[in-house]
Image: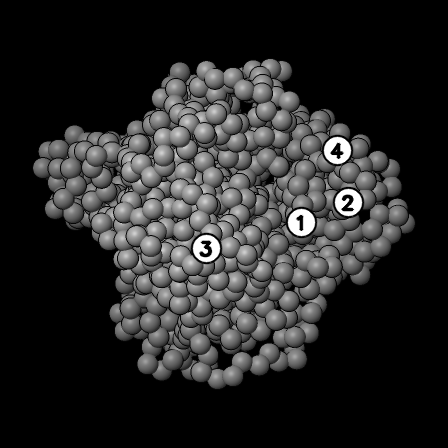
Amino acid sequence: MYSNHPSHSQQPIVFSQEMLDQSQEIIKHYPEGKQKSAILPIMHIVQKHFGWVSVEAQDIIAEMLKIKPIEVYEVATFYTMFHLHPVGKYVLEVCRTGPCMIRGAEDICKYLEKKLGIKEGEITADGLFTWRTVECLGACGYAPMMQVGEHYHEYLTPEKLDNLISDWKTK
Amino acid sequence: MGRKLLLEHAKVPGIRHIDTYIQHGGYRSVHKALKTMTPDEVVEEVKKSGLRGRGGAGFPTGMKWSFLAKPEGIPRYLVCNADESEPGTFKDRYLMEYLPHLLIEGMITSSYALGANTSYIYIRGEYRWVYTILVEAIAEAYAKGYLGKNILGSGFNFDLYVQPGGGAYICGEETALLESLEGKRGNPRMKPPFPAIKGLWQSPTVVNNVETIAAVVPIVNEGGDEYAKIGIGKSTGTKLISACGNIKNSGVYEIDLGLPVDEFLNSDEYCGGVANGKRLKAVIPGGSSVPIVPAGLFYKNIKGEDRLMSYESLSDGGFASGTMMGSGGFIVYDEDQCIVRNTWNLARFYNHESCGQCSPCREGTGWLVKVLDKIEHGKGATMADIDLLWDIQRRIEGNTICPLGDAAAWPVAAAIRHFRDEFEWHIKNPQLAQSKNYGLVKETVYQTV
Amino acid sequence: MAKVTIDDKIIEVPDGTTILNAARMIGGDVVPPAMCYYSKLKGSGGKCRTCLVEVAAGSEKDPRPMPKLVASCSTNVMDGMVVKNKTSEKVMDARKGVVEYLLMNHPLDCPVCDQAGECNLQDLGYEHGLQKTRYEFERRTFEVQDIGDNIKLHMNRCILCYRCVYTADQITEGRVHGVMGRGDHAEISTYITKAIDNDFSGNIIDVCPVGALTDKTFRFKSRVWFTRPMLAHRNCDKCCGKTTVWLSGDDVLRVTGRKDQNGEVEEFICNTCRFDKKSLADWSIEGPSHIDKHSVISQNHYELPSDNIKRLK
């Protein structure tokens, strides 16, 4: 059963001054009255700051851009980069599409599942990790690969994953 | 050794920065165009060059530019399509990552030609670090006076912004991209009106791929006629090819259009042949939506002529025996790869990326995945399922607002067309197919059954 | 003016007319079915693909055929255009496909669906569908959403025509519902649980081509074909007050906007008229409502023969 249901933030959501400044800067990119264009860039800012995009954050974006909340919800649920539910501190997004599949992406997923002890989309008990599959990330020549935050990790092997994960654990 | 019109300086240390870029001849096209040419003269050079859109459709760029409406008092826009998402394609990422100023230079010169005073680079959200590289490079260009007011004293004012997407393949379709840039869901628009008449915020807009805009730089520098001398027939100039799959040397290559496919795949200068001494099974030469062709039809067309890396040669034979140049996402499959599994995987991709507006694409892509899953995973498929697949894809193709429907249909059609045996083998041997691949030569397989 | 031929019938229409509207001017069999286009809603159309037609000749000036089938709801006619609807095998085949796609995940709950009898999808399936589905997988289901006191949303039945979204955008203030998600799990939703609550929200029921949005005040009260639709009006300070009331005996079971020959409401009505005025005393009855072609309800003859004759004149 499908459901595009929302997740609410447990804490009150407040945008920092830096986030507000960055958002205002982005709004200047567009002609007057076209500030709606800033939805996606601002959602990226929100996700970077909070780790995910709650309904409360979406409502603030609507208010900032002087648009209806539904206009933000429609957009937020359309694009797959935005986590609309809480996730681990590190979200490991493994490409599963053709060129990565033929170079071992499925084995990488199996390895992650075993290593982290969680199924796709779940959060580890320590709150550190979530892993999920995503579609082509444009790194087909350097497969298998995954994206974590702003970084691409390419030519993945179990050893490479072990190292990355232990690094993140000690950070 | 092919010439490098775009990537010549890609590996020069510091080329990401404007000083190094200028030292290596960067921004010459801006000087030349803004100081010595009228906008129409720039358009004329692009027309003469024969440059075709490098995003996948291959539409002549000069012609696209000449369609742009120019009503008085209404702004015009150039939007760079950097939403590179077609599986197998990673050339634009490479170009922007290593040569951000080449794209910026192309944007300035092209926007001057089109009379656009504000332009946007719409980059897929996942390329976040590339976004940062571009933003930094743009700041450098402002500081040097290549962007902003009265550029090089020419009176041309120009602002350039980078806009990140949010994770949607469909936004690589130009009207979906414009919707997304307007802050909406990436639902493609109905055409007409075309973006050249009503595009971004209902203003006349040209949407061009990253590589297309970058190619304007050498065209203006060397002249359209010089550019047109490279290549073969209507495939002029150089093309970036991103090569991946089961090959020795994955990566991005700049080739002269017209290079024999054999040389591209097998010479050490390029792909270096199939990896690990395996034999070639099939190739998707233009990104995952173009038809997959078996090795035999890849090297030679149906007339027995060598195939070349050109728009015309790759599509020779139509869909019956040919394929397409597409975006230049070159995916190679060795003998160990399963075509059914690959088709199922790609069908899942298109299903995942369908925006959901048109019923044939929304529902049909999901159905394709389910039937392919049944065949691939031995869930009781029958021969009738192959015909059903054919019927489903046939009724999606051509019946949707945007080409995503076609992109979803073609891989399934081509796989059945050329590898029907393999589908049938899966259906006849559901158990065996879980542990073993069909392989390359059907005789050897049938012996083991 | 442009002269256009549709299925061998010729009509002259003003420039800028769509193929679909030109066909509607001719009427009868040449009219392609339209599940998402709604002439009163700006921007609607193009999505369902049921109205695809073949353009055998583009225009007098350029008589080349168009390579693909086109959505007749959003393609303008040209002078000398030749269009094939029912006479095109390609169109019939594509439409059969579209019907199959629309039905493959649609629940077979017509027996308990309030829309039965006046459902565009039912009509479409009857005219163009297969006897049997070839889709053998589990149907997609969504959680049922409550979107207010008077409107029920059955997402499972929705065909994503977007009409209700355009309606909320264009004739109500402060749209609170829209399309969430994408692809085959896109759904009509308010996202956060909230009633769609404004004076004109009930019109989303009238524009819905299927039973996804139904009138809770009418739910399970009666089958539409057991009711008598009567044109009625009242003085209303919010809307035109011109409606169709659906009677059973002297009971007003439901109130809807008046529909034209294309099944579209003539004028949007307010929620007070629709949901609150359920007594015969609220209304001045004008006479039986004419039902053109839609489904089983037109099989009962509520109109006097003379009414029909009058309309035909």
**Tag nearer the camera, 3 or 1:** 3
Q: Nearer the viewer, residue C282 or B438?
A: C282
Please report contact status of discs 3 and 2: CB closer than 8 Å, yes or no: no
Residue at image coords 52%, 17%: C10
Q: Do the residues indicated by labels 3 and 4 lie within the same chain of the protein? A: no
- The residue wearing badge 3 is C283
Q: Do the residues indicated by labels 3 and 1 lie within the same chain of the protein? A: no
Lateral position of residue B171 relative to residue C117, left or right: right
Q: CA distance from mark 1 to mark 2?
A: 11 Å
Local secondary structure at mark 1: helix
Mark closest to the chain's N terminus, 4 or 2: 4
Q: Amino acid at mark 4?
A: Val
Quadrant hosting residue B365: top left
Q: Amino acid at mark 2?
A: Ile
Please report contact status of discs 1 and 4: CB closer than 8 Å, yes or no: no
Residue at image coords 71%, 26%: B48
- The residue wearing badge 4 is B43
Q: Amino acid at mark 3?
A: Trp
Q: Nearer the viewer, residue B261 or C295?
A: C295
- The residue wearing badge 1 is B201
| Place of residue B217 in the rendered image (x, y in percent of width and height, measured from the top left) | 71, 41
**Tag nearer the camera, 1 or 4:** 1
Quadrant hosting residue B258: top right
Local secondary structure at mark 4: helix
- The residue wearing badge 2 is B74
Instruction: Specify few, some or many for label 4: CA neighbours under 10 Å numbering under 14, 14-19, or 20 or more.
Output: many
